[in-house]
Image: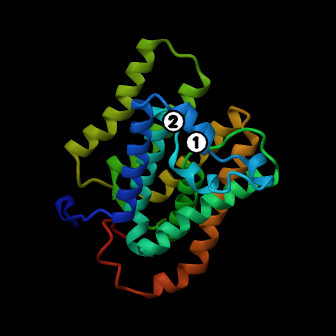
């Protein structure tokens, strides 16, 4: 059994979480969140005219609100914790960026008229790679819960008008259950595969229920990009045994 205190968290994953969180916090503190998102988010119509060419890259570090940031960063931490040690930092970051750019290309191709931003498509790519390379792994049950509850919260809060008291109670349950599971049973393990599937269904359900058809397509493209890269790398990775004792998951 791998002790939690012995786990060394993947560097790229932590760096991405830190960068996303710092950018969001700085923009909120300076009261320029909306202005920056509109200027540095993905601007497909501008790109088609040869302008705003950096926005496919800058848009992956922007988020619209706290819930958007929280759900994305929790998912990124869990998936990165599983995947980065297997792929290595460069390949992991490559999958992350490739999935986002593939989704951005869809927005540009359909001439999406608005502004798009967020790391959701990149994280969908990481999730797709996990589905191929990590589906046989087992992770702490608390980490698995953290995948499900934020996505469920996002789906409910986005589509259902809850009175403040119910919102607070559900939020406390959604965060409290994984936290108490981590405290009371830190070594209780669970297979990651069903939680991966639930996470993907929640993401698609949220997008479809809000009629974000273009967003749904972009997330699917990110997911397929991650699946494709993982399938191409799977044979080589599974052949090697160097990473087997390094990942903080149990096969």
Is 89 in front, or is 146? 89
Please tell me which residue is depicted at 30% across the width and 66% down the height of the picture: 248
In the picture, the disc for residue 166 is: none
Position above or below: 247 against 117: below
Spatial distance from mark 1 to mark 2, Cα to Cα? Answer: 6 Å
Image location (x, y in percent) of residue 206: 62, 37
Residue 170 is at least partly visible in this image: yes
Is 152 placed left or right of 44 in the picture? left
Is 14 placed left or right of 239 in the picture? left
Position above or below: 200 against 66: below
Please tell me which residue is depicted at 82% across the width and 50% down the height of the picture: 110
In the picture, the disc for residue 202 is: 1
Image location (x, y in percent) of residue 87: 45, 74
Q: Quadrant of residue 205?
A: top right
Quadrant where the C terminus lies? Answer: bottom left
Position above or below: 29 against 179: above
Crowd tier of the residue under label 1, counting other residues whose Cα lies within 10 Å: few below 14, some 14–19, many 20 or above? many
Please tell me which residue is depicted at 58% across the width and 27% down the height of the picture: 158
Is 83 placed left or right of 214 in the picture? left
Crowd tier of the residue under label 2, counting other residues whose Cα lies within 10 Å: few below 14, some 14–19, many 20 or above? many
Residue 131 is at least partly visible in this image: no
Element on which disc 2 rests: helix
In the picture, the disc for residue 152 is: 2
Please tell me which residue is depicted at 56% across the width and 63% down the height of the picture: 97
Q: Cβ–Cβ below 8 Å for labels 1 and 2?
A: yes
Position above or below: 251 against 57: below
Is 152 in front, or is 60? 60
Image location (x, y in percent) of residue 12: 39, 64
Is 183 in front, or is 63? 63
Indicate which disc, 1 or 2, sits on the residue closer to the N terminus.
2
């Amino acid at each position: 059994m791998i002790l939690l205190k012995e786990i060394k968290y993947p560097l790229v994953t932590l760096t991405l979480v830190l960068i996303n969180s710092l950018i969001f916090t700085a923009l909120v503190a300076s009261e320029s969140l909306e202005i920056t998102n509109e200027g540095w988010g993905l601007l497909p119509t501008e790109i088609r005219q040869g302008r705003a060419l950096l926005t496919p890259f800058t848009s992956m570090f922007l988020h619209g609100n706290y819930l958007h940031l929280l759900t994305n960063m929790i998912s990124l931490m869990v998936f990165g914790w599983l995947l980065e040690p297997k792929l290595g930092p460069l390949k992991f970051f490559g999958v992350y960026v490739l999935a986002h750019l593939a989704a951005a290309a869809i927005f540009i191709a359909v001439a999406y008229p608005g502004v798009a931003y967020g790391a959701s498509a990149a994280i969908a790519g990481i999730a797709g790679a996990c589905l191929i390379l990590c589906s046989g792994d087992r992770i702490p049950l608390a980490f698995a819960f953290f995948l499900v509850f934020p996505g469920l919260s996002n789906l409910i809060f986005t589509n259902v008008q809850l009175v403040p008291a119910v919102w607070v109670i559900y939020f406390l349950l959604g965060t409290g259950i994984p936290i108490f599971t981590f405290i009371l049973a830190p070594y209780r393990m669970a297979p990651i595969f069903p939680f991966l599937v639930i996470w993907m269904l929640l993401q698609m359900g949220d997008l479809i229920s809000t009629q974000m058809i273009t967003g749904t397509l972009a997330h699917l493209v990110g997911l397929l990009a991650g699946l494709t890269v993982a399938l191409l790398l799977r044979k080589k990775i599974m052949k090697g045994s160097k990473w087997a004792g390094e990942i903080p998951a149990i096969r």
